[in-house]
Image (cartoon, rainbow, N blue to C red):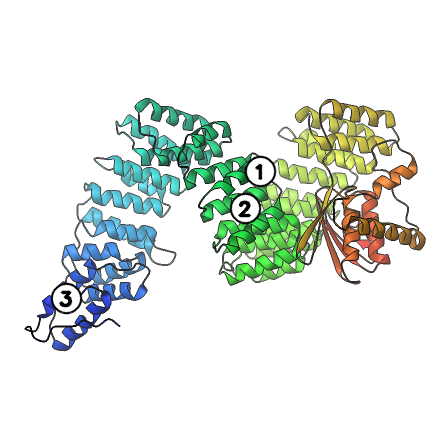
Amino acid sequence: MEILTVNPISSPPTPTHLISSAATVPQLKQIHARILRSGLDLTPSLLSRLLSLPLNATATPSLDYALSVLLCTPRPPSRLRCRALRLLDPRRTIVAYARLRQDGTDLDRFDFPPLLRAAARAGEGEGGDAIAREAHGFVVKMGFVADPFVVTALVRAYALRGWVTDARAVFDRMPERDLVAWGVMLDGCCQSGFYSEALQLFEEMKSSNVTPDQMVLATVLSACGRTGNLSSGKAIHSYILETGIAMDAHIRSSLINLYSNCRSMDIAEELFDEMSPKDLVASTAMVFGYAKIGRIETARAIFDDMPEKDLVCWSAMISGYVESDKPSEALKLFNEMQDLGVRPDQITVLSVISACAHLGALDQAKWIHIFVDKNRFRDVLMIRNALIDMYSKCGNLAGAWRVFDGTPRKNVITWTSMITGLAMHGDGRSALVLFEQMKAEGVEPNGVTFIGLLYACSHSGLVAEGRQVFESMVREHKIEPKLEHYGCMVDLLCRAKLLREAFELIESMPFRPNVIIWGSLLGGCRVHMDVELGEIAANKILELDPDHDGAYVLLSNIYAKANMWDEVGRVRRLMKCRGVSKEKGCSWLEINGNVHEFLMGDESHPNSKDIYRKLEDIVQELEHNVGYSPDTGSVLVDLEEEEKKGAVLLHSEKLALSFGLINSERGSCIRIAKNLRVCEDCHSFMELVSKVFDREIVLRDRTRFHHYKNGVCSCKGFW
């Protein structure tokens, strides 16, 4: 502890002199103790000196001490009172205000701005809403409604609390609105997500002959970027150039952010190249923009060139990898970020959870769950909902249930995530039971909930139940069906071989069907061999999207199964002519925390020779023990039968399975994820392997999960 020393030769200093000579808070506390023992009352002087010392805003004892001295000061002067309210954090400011009101202290115009600032920034349960309303009443009662200093603070408080309508009402009644007031109102709209209102307000501001400054322009450009309003953003850019407003780094960064958000990377790149030095905000915007349009390598090059990186930048790059279907790179970058000591926030954690879900990597998923718990994210509902989705997509419904059951306050997203997870795994009955429980708990379902329910019915063959869900959505819950709901119904009918009914439903829709809906019909035609309807569906898809590879492939499948090889050749020639290529099959498998990737016929894996040798052994054992013969119906070229068999055996999920059998113990579960729908041969291959090799296999394809055990799949043929 610091000790305040006094020269013994000189005359004893007075308490007032001691207070003024204190250089630190600990010294001031010593002097305060002496004063209390002496019976003197010098709290105003003590408070004045305390407030002139540098208080550490994060040092709770210092702030508590300042608050206690303020509350012990009888009727503190306005100047000291106002300074104290400015220095204290929101919670302590609200406590001080309540005590001052209790003591009958008369407030003046200088008290309200710091009080309203505290109300605006107060956390949940700290009384910010009530204080803002109460302060508004006092402002009116005490005649401060014409004071721009006070009223601007009131507008800011309402806006930051999310009450934009109330803020606008106060703002509109202001007799004079200067640049600061306009800036506060604009910023409040943007902070609360009222971007369209912010753009309208900016036009009103210009009509009022108030010239915007750089901060206002940056705020409005942010609103344009958030809404994707490129035309308004370009108009503001032109306004800046025409009026000669200085293009400082803040404005330039805002413009780069605007064009990046609107995918106009050519203009963003010009502005970025002219910038020297390149600041963090602009560089992050470029990373985000390039990732958004799929130029992930360019985004990474800019990221690597940044001399300093903050959390937002790391999050943008990680999110870019996730959105570009590169989840492995996202996880690697997150680990690198951790090694450098950068602490993630909720946005980063959500991106990493999404990466684990995309990969289907259960070991990684369990690790991120432990990370969430250790780093105090476990009570964040948004993250808990994402964990439910992650475990479901990693094939671990038990893990999803644990998170769901352990979530004390569930919202509609929580329930919907669990329902969708059950749907993915083909457990339609449980999804319907959970839906009834959700309604019993008083949680109102939304449109996404019904998509999950219809999806669950579709993948479980529950036709009658699906029809009932669709009707109740409209009749009981007053939710108008959207394309996605009709798509689920079409898929449900197609899987149940009700192709004509599905076609009639498409024809009766109140809006134009999209590629996905026609794709569901085309997929059903492929499974149930309806060449006529399949041709209609494929042509409809190609009218909407001439480069849709799935339409060509599925139509080729239909023709190939029907041995219509001339038509197969015609479709393949058309694909070649239009430059359309089939998406390559890719599968992932996690072994000991490492994710291994396999392509069809891939030989790039370090253990490739062992994998193909193991695959040969598996095929031989299946042929001898259970009479397996490859199903060549999915081969799209007219080859000899042996060549077709060879092509089918090279599918990526079979390679992943072979690697899994090499590197895991008998009786353990093998988990595989695939980017495409599993073919008929691979599906039956997995069933047979699960029986002959006594393995549980969990395969996630593009549409759902398949749990293979003892020669049976959980899908029961509805896949």
**Label 3, on which residue?**
19
Q: Amino acid at mark 1?
A: Glu
Q: Nearer the viewer, residue 571 or 322?
A: 322
Q: Residues within 10 Å of mark 2 (few under 14, many from 20)?
A: many
3 and 2 marks in contact (CB < 8 Å): no
Residue 510 in view, yes or no:
yes
N-term-proximal mark, 3 vs 2: 3
Q: Percent position (x, y) of residue 111? A: 20, 52
Q: Residue at x 45, y 44 (%)?
A: 307
Q: Quadrant of the N terminus?
A: bottom left
- What percent of the width, then of the height, locates residue 479? 57, 41
The residue under label 3 is which amino acid type? Ile
In what element is the residue under mark 1?
helix
Residue assigned mark 1:
297
Nearest-to-viewer mark from 3 and 1:
1
Q: Nearer the viewer, residue 540 or 470?
A: 540
Q: Please state which amino acid type lies under the numbered disc 2.
A: Ile
Asked if residue 662 is positioned above or below residue 220 in the image, the reply reads below
| Label 2 sits on residue | 318
User: Farthest residue in the bottom direction?
Assistant: 37
Q: Residues within 10 Å of mark 3 (few under 14, many from 20)?
A: many
Marked residue nearer the N-terminal end (2 or 1): 1
**Counting residues from the N terminus, which is met first, the one under dot 3 or under dot 1?**
3
Q: Dividing the picture into quarters, in which one does residue 104 lie?
A: bottom left
Up/down of 220 relative to 470, above or below: above
* Residue 158 x %, y %: 32, 46
Mark closer to the observer (2, 1): 1
Q: Vertically, is 2 above or below 711?
A: below
State the separation of the CA atoms marked 2 and 1: 13 Å
Q: Circle 3 sits in a helix, a strand or a loop, which is it? A: helix
The image position of residue 258, as x and y in percent, is: 44, 33
* CA distance separating discs 3 and 1: 62 Å
